[in-house]
Image (tube, grey):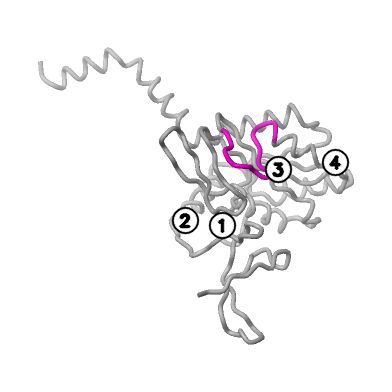
Amino acid sequence: MDLSTYLNMVIGSFWYLIPLFIFVAIIKSACFKGVFGEWQVNQLIKFFLDKNEYHLIKDVTLPTENGTTQIDHIIVSKFGIFVVETKNMKGWIFGGDNQKQWTQKIYKHTSKFQNPLHQNYKHVKTLEACLTTKKECVFSVIIFIGDSTFKTKMPDNVAFARGGIEYIKSKKEIVFTNDEVANIVDQIESGRLKRGFKTNRQHVKHVKAIVEQKPDTKPCKKCGAEMVLRKATKGKNAGNEFWGCSSFPKCRNILKIS
């Protein structure tokens, strides 16, 4: 019996396992985990937030100066606008406000991932630029889904599952009228890119380009925003470059270049 005949016999005997292997590969993929995590957060929002008070807009892709940014969930209410970033992860999670990267530890395996607060900061700023509304009424929310445990103290707006919903419900001051809420929803719906394969492909291409770049950037130690390279225009340091917080004038933190 030659090798090809033997392989055909083996494949013929176990053909029914092929769909199982494909299914396992799919559910273990990062893409599936992301989509499943977003679906779980969708269910939390639908079950635990009154849909008459909180208006959910899912999977919003907005144009930016150099590409696009994709927001998992935007919740608009009379209590504010909530920009939600979902993380479907397991293991121990270590991180802090100002750390550029957080750590995931599963038994002896340790890996790094982008600080979701920094990641969502861009989402918030992009949305603020698209809206004609009060910026102090836009809140960043990070919701973790999956078998994960925080091993360091997290800010109030970083929580696991129901904790993220409770953070949203903790905002009780009315900041928008019903008409303003409807207007904000219309602005977001009209400003988003059309949902579909083409939009997703363009966004993935943009993200890959960012990952491939290695810019010399650093987070602000006071507020967590990105520090940008600037040049002094007056005073004794005129002409000298320095690192300044991108959220200026809200944050005036600077770093000298040694």
Pick whichever of labels 1 and 2 is earlier in the sequence: 1
Tag 3 secondary structure: loop
The foreground one among 194 and 177 is 177
Question: Which residues make up the magenta segment?
Answer: 149-163
Dot 2: within a 10 Å radius of its alpha carbon, few (fewer than 14), some, or many (20 or more) residues? Answer: few
Q: Nearer the viewer, mark 3 or mark 2?
A: 3
Q: Nearer the viewer, mark 3 or mark 1?
A: 3
Residue denoted by label 4: 172
Q: Nearer the viewer, mark 1 or mark 2?
A: 2
* 1 and 2 marks in contact (CB < 8 Å): yes
Classify residue 214 by image quadrant: bottom left
Residue 150 falls within the magenta-colored stretch: yes
Whole-angstrom CA distance, mark 1 to mark 2, is 10 Å
Quadrant of residue 174 within the rendered picture? top right
Is 31 included in the stretch rendered in magenta?
Answer: no
Q: Which residue is mark 1?
A: 67
